[in-house]
Image (cartoon, helix red, strand yellow):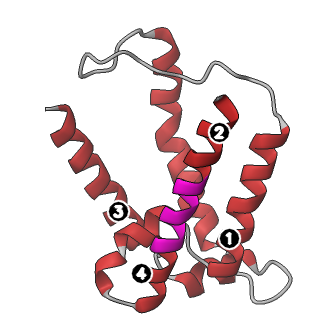
Amino acid sequence: MIKLTAFFAGMIFGLGLLLAGMANPAKVLAFLDVAGAWDPSLALVMGGAIAVAVIPLNWAPKNKHSLLGTPTQLPVKKELDARLIGGSLVFGIGWGIAGICPGPAVAILLSGHWQIIIFVLAMLAGMYLFSALENRRKS
């Protein structure tokens, strides 16, 4: 049941990304171009996402289990550190250069565009590199 719920949540998320235009790199780059032909429409998408997230984000800390009965796992670390800021910068720079982030990339992967395939392969390589560096750091 948990995997089926995760599958449907991912499908709804991907559909939302497609409908909102988040899978269109030109639209994302126009949103990021605040000094040029700025397209503020994605701010509405982000505002809507925040509004939808408010209820579960307030509910989760008060409950030890999710609605499906699994333990609620919330971050315990509250402070900013160099790793979080550095990771955020790398993510933002990559998003700005490519005009796409991981969620929309996966959502449009089956379009067959070679650029998306290269992006997803680079993303997977980055995930692998991070995992290898984390394992090395911990040992």
> Amino acid under label 4?
Ile
Residue 20, numbered circle: none
Q: Which residue appears at 46% of the width and 72% of the height?
A: 120
The span from disc 2 to disc 3 (Cα, nearest Å) is 34 Å
Q: Earlier in the sequence, mark 2 or mark 4?
A: 4
Q: For mark 1, what is the residue?
A: 94
- Whether pointer 1 and pointer 4 mark residues with C-beta atoms closer than 8 Å, the reply is no
Locate the C terminus by quadrant. Answer: top right
- Residue drawn at (42%, 10%) of the image: 63
Q: Residues within 10 Å of mark 1 (few under 14, many from 20)?
A: some
Evaluate whether residue 20 shows in this view. no
- Please state the horizontal and vertical placement of residue 50, each as a whole percent of the image: 56, 45
Could you tell me which secondary element the residue under label 2 belongs to?
A: helix
Q: Is tag 1's residue or tag 2's residue first in the polypeptide sequence?
A: 1
The residue under label 3 is 14
Q: Quick one: label 1 or label 4, which is nearer the N terminus?
A: 1
Residue at the spot of label 4 = 117
Q: CA distance from mark 1 to mark 2?
A: 24 Å
Mark 2, residue position:
136
* Residue 49 at least partly seen: yes
